[in-house]
Amino acid sequence: MGFGVSPRLKLRADGAIPFPRPGKRPLPEAFAEARSLPGHLSDLELEQLYAAAAGARSAHWFGADAEAIQAATMLYAGGAGRVEVVKPSSKHPPDLVVVQNGAAVPDDCLLLPQARVLRLEGFSKKASRRRQLHDKIRGGGRLRVVLINDVGFQYGAGVATRRQAQSFLMAGWDVAMVSWNAGTAGEYPPVAKLQAPGRWIHTCSLPDVHPNFRLTPEEIIERVVSAVKDAKPDFVLLGNIHGASWPIELLTALRDADFAVAAYMHDLHWVTGRCAYPGPCRKYVEDGCDETCPTAEQYPPLPRDRIRGEWLKRADVFSGPDAIPLIANSHWTAGIARSRFGNTAVIDTIHLALDHRQFARVDRTLARRLLGIADERPLVLLGSVNVKEERKGGPIFVSLLEQLRQRSDVGVLAFGHGSESLPCTKAFGMVTDERQMALIYSAADIFVGTALEEAFGQTLLEGAAVGLPIVAFNAGGVVEAVKNGETGILVEEKSAEAIIAAIDTLLADPALAASMGREGASRVEREFSLPVQAEAWRTYIQRIFLEPSV
């Protein structure tokens, strides 16, 4: 009896993993041992090896070194007298040949006349990657995650991506980013008061990978996939890319390159033929987006003759037996995706989160003093990424500000792009430093969001984390960020007057406002903190990418 082993396999084993013991053994004993060894053979494949070995004097393995010791263990236990994983010689011609995943058997391989061939066709590169993921998680290993988006950590979806990166780092994983134009906001995302156990690898910015540089979609995909390969990820999460005009086929190219990949819905761009928010338009779920799109020239613009094709591509990518998994930022967003793609889509929800320690409340008097606010009246804070955007309720925002500033019993603070010129107690403009944002929220008594379309509502979550009662319109996924009557007041009528009525309710009942603020901060820590998001991602990856192949 003997065991032939390749030099590469010897180097991998390095004495740490015992070579298989010759001699027939019971199937349960051998199965339990082989299953615990390094390698990715399936349970069925282990059983097939054991059965095929019965009566074999010499067996040869043609397959991956990573599975050779697993295979030899089962072949010996099944009764094989000798197992070799090197090129067979005339000295020991096999009567059993095991071929893994179509591996080539050399032409000069000498087989006994009665030789049998066992082909393990169930093994695949994709399955191998999933099993490697399983082994890492089961063994407490560090996953390596690559985030892909258009503008790094800038703007609303970029902030959400940064917080996803923070949660991955808190899970102890290694994280890299590939972006079209990350700017200066693609640096390591620190977590307040903690040294996250994960490792930040790098940000790879690809500003010249854009159709404006006369690159074809195929060339763009090749460049992006190459950057992803350099980071050697276990899992790839693709977020917003419409700012980069990168093609949706990037998702299938990543899958075909053997990556476990999923797409994250910060808005509805993955569902429609072009737009991020369709407003009252229902073409995306009725007769389909096409050249009659009512907003084709708005961001992100797309030539009208391309809209139908983009809409059709999404069904190919996100539904059917090879569907790319979709992850929504709210149940509302997920529901819209299901209405478009149906039961063959793989759609889940992982809510956005934030660093609740970073948004811990600062004493109101101190916050106002640090920000140079002398006003002692109750202050209402209005804000969004862009206060003049119609989807964010721009006209209502302006009307609300005008009505409130005429009152003597309340002051107004404002933040967001376009707010710097607004007449109010103090306007902060576009603020990108979360540490300063925590101060701004802490200086206020009530936070108001005026978005008419919202997939979730990160600013609402930020205000709640600081302990402010929230007033907002009941629109889209806002109902998941704000619990009506518990952490704030959701208004049905889309008007400045309806918002003011809710503000007055809170001003007239300080105890109610304080209660909502406390519950809001507590709920953020319970449901929307980075540790909660980290655990949600860990569970998701195990369930979607690992369990079916184990």
Image: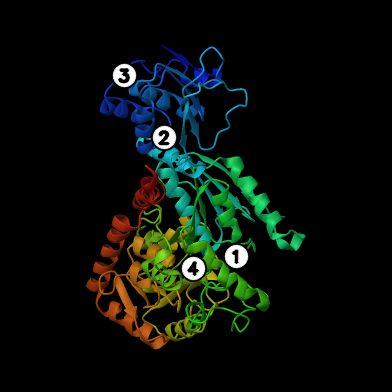
Question: Cα distance, mark 1 to mark 2?
Answer: 40 Å
Is residue 89 rendered to the left or right of residue 81? right
Q: Report how far apart the C-alphas of labels 2 and 3 lie in the structure.
A: 20 Å
Which is more N-terminal, label 3 or label 2? 3
The outermost residue toward the right is: 214
Residue at x-position 23% and y-position 73%: 512
Mark sitting earlier along the chain (4/2): 2
Quarter of the image for the C terminus: give it.
top left
Which kind of residue does numbered mark 3 sit on?
Lys
Which mark's residue is nearer the viewer, 4 or 3?
3
Residue found 31% across the figure and 76% down from its top:
489
Q: What is the C-alpha distance between the residues marked 3 and 1?
A: 60 Å
* Nearer to me, 203 or 254: 254
Q: Position of residue 250 (x, y in %)?
A: 60, 56
Instruction: Kindly identify the amino acid type of the residue bearing the numbered disc 2.
Output: Leu
Foreground of the two, 126 or 116: 116
Task: Report the Cα–Cα distance between label 4 and label 3.
Answer: 59 Å
| CB-based contact (under 8 Å), mark 4 and mark 2 | no
On the image, numbered disc 2 is attached to which residue?
A: 41
Query: Split into 4 quadrants, where in the image is the N terminus?
Result: top left
Q: Which residue position is annotated with label 1?
A: 242
Local packing at callout 3 (Cα closer than 10 Å; few below 14, some 14-19, many 20+) is some
Neighbourhood count class around disc 2 (C-alpha, 10 Å): few under 14, some 14–19, many 20 upward: many
The residue pinned by badge 4 equals 267
Q: Secondary structure at mark 1?
A: loop
Q: Mark 1 vs mark 4: which is more N-terminal?
A: 1
Q: Secondary structure at mark 2?
A: loop
- In space, the residues marked 4 and 2 are separated at their CA atoms by 40 Å
Q: Amino acid at mark 1?
A: His
